[in-house]
Amino acid sequence: MSQQNRRIVLASRPVGAPTQDNFRIEQVDIPQPKEGEVLLKAIYLSLDPYMRGRMNDAESYAEPVALNEVMVGATVCRVEASKNDQFEEGEWVLAYTGWQDFGISNGEA
């Protein structure tokens, strides 16, 4: 069995406090980095109060998370594979790959 990317998506907009019913866990293929990108494995995930506002479909200082998309969030990650000269496999980085085990970054931000 090959490893999969476990991700948590926003399934519905919460009314009041979010519940498990507002999210869905999906298993998808691990993304593959293209030239100039790195594959990151999230080790630590930041959970912050601002995320509740991102779950609403309302005007705000930040765009709302679209339904059925990975919930946003900062992550401390390890570089699993690199096709970017600025990063080596095994390095630790701060990224914004959201609520998922693996994400792709182009190395910016």
Image (cartoon, rainbow, N blue to C red):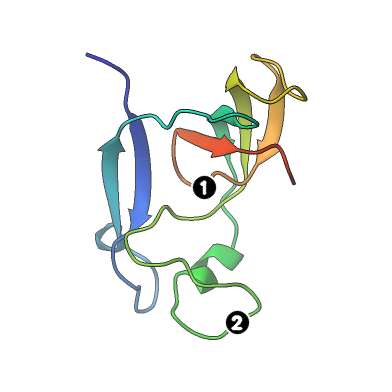
Query: Which residue sits at x=27%, y=36%?
Result: 27
Disc 2 crowd, CA 10 A, few/some/many (<14, 14-19, 20+): few
Distance from Cα at disc 2 to Cα at disc 1: 19 Å
Q: What element carries label 2?
A: loop
Residue 55, compared with residue 21, is above or below; it is below
Q: Quadrant of residue 17?
A: bottom left
Give the residue number, with chain letter if any, for mark 1. 98
Q: What residue type is labelled 2?
A: Ser
Q: Residue 43 in the image: state x and y as whole percent.
A: 55, 28
Query: Which residue sits at x=55%, y=44%?
Result: 97
The answer to whether residue 75 is left or right of residue 28 is right
Q: Residue 10 in the image: state x and y as whole percent.
A: 35, 60
The answer to whether residue 55 is left or right of residue 6 is right
Disc 1 crowd, CA 10 A, few/some/many (<14, 14-19, 20+): many
Residue 10, compared with residue 5, is above or below; it is below
Q: Is mark 1 on a helix, strand or loop?
A: loop
Query: Which residue sits at x=45%, y=77%?
Result: 56
Foreground: 43 or 102?
102
- Which labelled disc corresponds to residue 60? 2
Q: Residue 92 in the image: state x and y as whole percent.
A: 70, 24
- N-terminal of the pair, mark 2 or mark 1, is 2
Foreground: 45 or 38?
38
Foreground: 20 or 92?
92
Q: What residue type is labelled 1?
A: Gly
Residue 51, compared with residue 40, is above or below; it is below
Q: Which residue lies furthest to the bottom in this view?
A: 59
How many numbered circles are shown? 2
Q: In which quarter of the image is residue 39?
A: top right
Foreground: 82 or 73?
82
